Image (tube, rainbow, N blue to C red):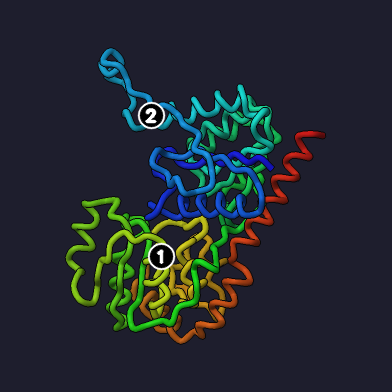
Amino acid sequence: MRVCLIASSRFPIREPFHGGLEAHTASLAEQLVRRGHQVSVFAAPGSDPRLDVQELAVDRYVPSDAARQDVGATPDDWMREHHAYLALMMELARTGAERFDVIHNNSLHHLPIAMAELVDVPVVSTLHTPPVPWLESALQVCRGDTRFVAVSRHTAAAWAHAVSAEVVLNGVDTDRWREGPGGPRAVWSGRIVPEKAPHLAALAAMRAGIPIDIAGPRMDDDYFEREMRPLLGPDVRHVGHLDSGALVDLVGRAAVAIVSPMWDEPYGLVAAEAMSCGTPVAAFDRGALGEIVVDGTGALARAGDVDALAAAVATARSADRATVRRHAVSHLGVDRMISAYEDVYQRARLGAAA
């Protein structure tokens, strides 16, 4: 099939990834190409040219001096993102039917949903977040034959008031996220932002008596300086923003991965990645993490309770790494996800032809 993937216009799809959405998009593109599909991708400038995909170039909007004088003008970044998706959807309305068999929207922007009716190509849109106003408003005007997919049962249920979505769990490349030997330290990985709360993971590790490495980009400097900086030392290290190779090595050498969201995780990719390395997971029980971390693979703790998370760390460390790895390979792998999306694409094409 000829597949157009719509990704983020904000962050490039390249190593080291800014977050799980960018990693997911790269894996989706690579695996679809590996299965013989022709893939084009719309993504932010600077995406990895080694991906065997095309980048759909979109000119960036730069407001004129006259437009800047409007006291009610929206921020430039918002306008650039709006312009990028508006230009893309207009281009797909003009030429999409000649170039693609299916469009798969993995962005967090409202226009690929709201403007799907203008494109004479079946559209599949994956819900990667809890309900947000812009996407809810787009759903009210989108055409009825757009197919919606949610990345977990939790996310599908959260959107059920607005749209019916089938579930395709995200998947990890269990060959890339290979089994590791474990080690003496815990690990936390992800964007360093308040809603991911790595400082709570650090506090839980300290209370459990295990040192921890924090890996990820500093996306909120005020938060980092306020909550993380005072904790740093030999037992709490920030090891930086790592590419996937270095991150696989770090996670594989960890005794336990700690996942500490202060929001409802739509999926929890970092948990699946850790389990693929055989590293058990201790996590706050929020969002879809209960679908990922099951008996024998780690332990869940009451959301926001650091003492409970510390106890979960102690429990998770006793899990058998081989059992954790087997579960990830059987239930969380990328091949299952790609097969499911191929089925969704095919049904979308048949529905459009009916």
| Of residues 285 and 45, the one drawn nearer to the viewer in this rendering | 45
| Of residues 81 and 5, the one drawn nearer to the viewer in this rendering | 5
In which quadrant of the rendered image does the C terminus lie? Answer: top right
Q: Quadrant of residue 309?
A: bottom left
Residue 302, x across and y down, in percent: 43, 70
Residue at 37 percent across and 24 percent down: it is 61
Instruction: Relative to 307, say whether 343 is above or below.
Output: above
Q: Quadrant of residue 82?
A: top left
Residue matched to label 2: 80
Residue 37, x across and y down, in percent: 65, 47
Q: Residues within 10 Å of mark 1 (few under 14, many from 20)?
A: few
In which quadrant of the rendered image does the N terminus lie? Answer: top right
Instruction: Relative to 162, say whether 282 is above or below.
Output: below
Rendered image: mark on residue 245: 1
Whichever of labels 2 and 1 marks the residue nearer the N terminus, that label is: 2
Give the amino acid type for the residue marked by disc 2 in the picture.
Arg
Residue at 49 percent across and 38 percent down: it is 55
Please give left or right for residue 96 compared with residue 286 in the image: right
Disc 2 and disc 1: Cα gap in Å? Answer: 32 Å
Q: Residues within 10 Å of mark 2 (few under 14, many from 20)?
A: some
Give the SS element for disc 1. helix
Q: Are marks 2 and 1 in contact (CB under 8 Å)?
A: no
Instruction: Relative to 49, say whether 279 is above or below.
Output: below
Give the amino acid type for the residue marked by disc 1 in the picture.
Gly
Please give left or right for residue 241 compared with residue 232 in the image: right
Residue 211, x across and y down, in percent: 28, 78
Residue at 42 percent across and 75 percent down: it is 252
